[in-house]
Image (cartoon, rainbow, N blue to C red):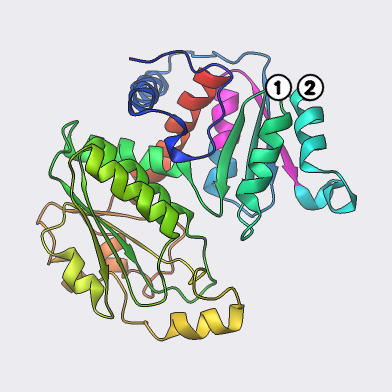
Amino acid sequence: MQTYLHGRDLIGDLDFSKEEVETVLDVAFDLKRKRALGEPHAYLRDKVLAMLFFFSSTRTRGSFEAGMAQLGGHGAFIESTTTQIAHGDTAKEIGEIYGRYFDGIAIRHCDWPVGNAYLNEVAKASRVPVLNMQCEIYHPFQCLADLMTIIEKKGRDLRKKKIVVSWAYAASYLKPISVPQSLILQMPRFGMDVTLAYPPGFQLMPEIVDMAQEQARKYKTGFEIVEDANGMDIAFKDADVIYAKSWGPLLTTTDKVEGKKLQDSFQNWITDERKMALAQPDAIYMHPLPADRNIEVTDGVIDGPNSVVYDEAENRLHAQKAVMALTM
C-alpha cells in the first residue's frame, strides 16, 4: 500500500499509480463506513478548499462541499464569472495566490481545448494540491467513484469482467469526452476487459486511446473498439457493466450546429430494455448523471433493478473525501 499522497495533484487518471488508487479506495470505503456509523472523521479540521467552477455542476459541487464539511473543513465555492478571471487574472496568478489562501484548489474547466492546460498551469504555480473536478480530457473523481461502485457490486476481483463504455444519444448539448476517456484508462488497471463503442464521428482522443491500450497490454486485459452505426447491439453482448452516456463529436467538429446534426443522426443509440437483455442477467447499468431520460436511456432501465446510478452518485462523496484527506 502506498500511503504518502500528501501534497499531490490529481489532474489525470494515471497521476496516481494502481497501488495509490487502491489506497484511495481503501480510505473511501472506510470513510463510507464511518459516515454510516456516525463516527467523526474530521481529518481536515481548519482546512479550506477553493472550488473554482468554469462549468455548471450539481453532484460535483454538492459532493465536494459536503465532503469538506464532513472532514471538518470548508469548501469555498467560486464561480469564474464572479471573479476577475475574465478581466485578466491568469492561471499562474490563481495558482500563486489561491495556493497561499487555501489548502487545496479544485477546478472544473471543461472548455475544449483549454481546460486541462489551465489546470496544469495553476498546478505549476501552486504550493498546494490541485484537484481536477473535470476538464475536457479527464474526470478522475467520477472514475474513482465508478470503480468503487463496480467493486461494491461485482467484488474486488474484476478480472475478465467486461465493461462496455458506450456512446448514447442525447438531445441536450454536446457533452465532454472526459468520462469515457477516464474509464478506458483506469478500468484495465483493475483487470476489466474494455469495449469502447461509438458511431462514426464520435471517436476519442487517439493519444488517450493509445494510453488505454498500453494499460490493457500491461495488465493483460482485453480492449476492443466497436465503431459501427449499430455498435450498441454488438458491444452489449455478455457485458457485466454497461456504462452508456453521450459525448460530443469533438474530434470530428467543434461547430455546435454541425455537431448537433451529426449527433441527431444516431437517435437509435438509446439504452433500453432490449439492449440491456443482451448483457449478462446481473449486469449493472451506470451513468454519471444527469441523463436525458427516454432519449439517452429509458426510464425502465435507469429506474430498473440493474441500475446503480444513485449508489454511483453517492460514491462521488466518499471517493473525493478520500483523495482530499490523503492529499490535503
**Three-letter amino acid code of the residue under disc 1:** Arg
- Position of residue 176 in the picture relative to residue 124 (left or right): left
Where in the figure is residue 285, as x and y percent of width and height? 26, 55
The residue drawn where x is 45% and y is 59% is 205
Residue assigned mark 1: 127
Q: Based on the picture, tell me whether residue 75 belongs to the magenta stretch.
A: yes
Q: Based on the picture, tell me whether residue 178 belongs to the magenta stretch.
A: no
Residue neighbourhood size for the residue with mark 1, other residues' Cα within 10 Å, grouped as few (<14), some (14–19), many (≥20): some
Furthest residue toward right: 87
Residue assigned mark 2: 100
Q: Against 25, is 40 above or below?
A: above
Where in the figure is residue 223, as x and y percent of width and height? 22, 53
Circle 2: element type: helix
Disc 1 vs disc 2: Cβ atoms closer than 8 Å?
Answer: yes
Task: Work out how far the residue at label 1 is from the one at label 2, CA to CA, in angstroms.
Answer: 7 Å
Q: Which residues are magenta?
A: 64-79
Where in the figure is residue 18, as x and y percent of width and height? 33, 29
- Position of residue 240 in the picture relative to residue 216 (left or right): left
- Quadrant where the C terminus lies? top right
Residue 288 visible in the snapshot: no
Q: Nearer the viewer, mark 1 or mark 2?
A: 1
Where in the figure is residue 315, as x and y percent of width and height? 39, 37
From the viewer's side, name the closer residue of 299 and 206: 206
**Three-letter amino acid code of the residue under disc 2:** Arg
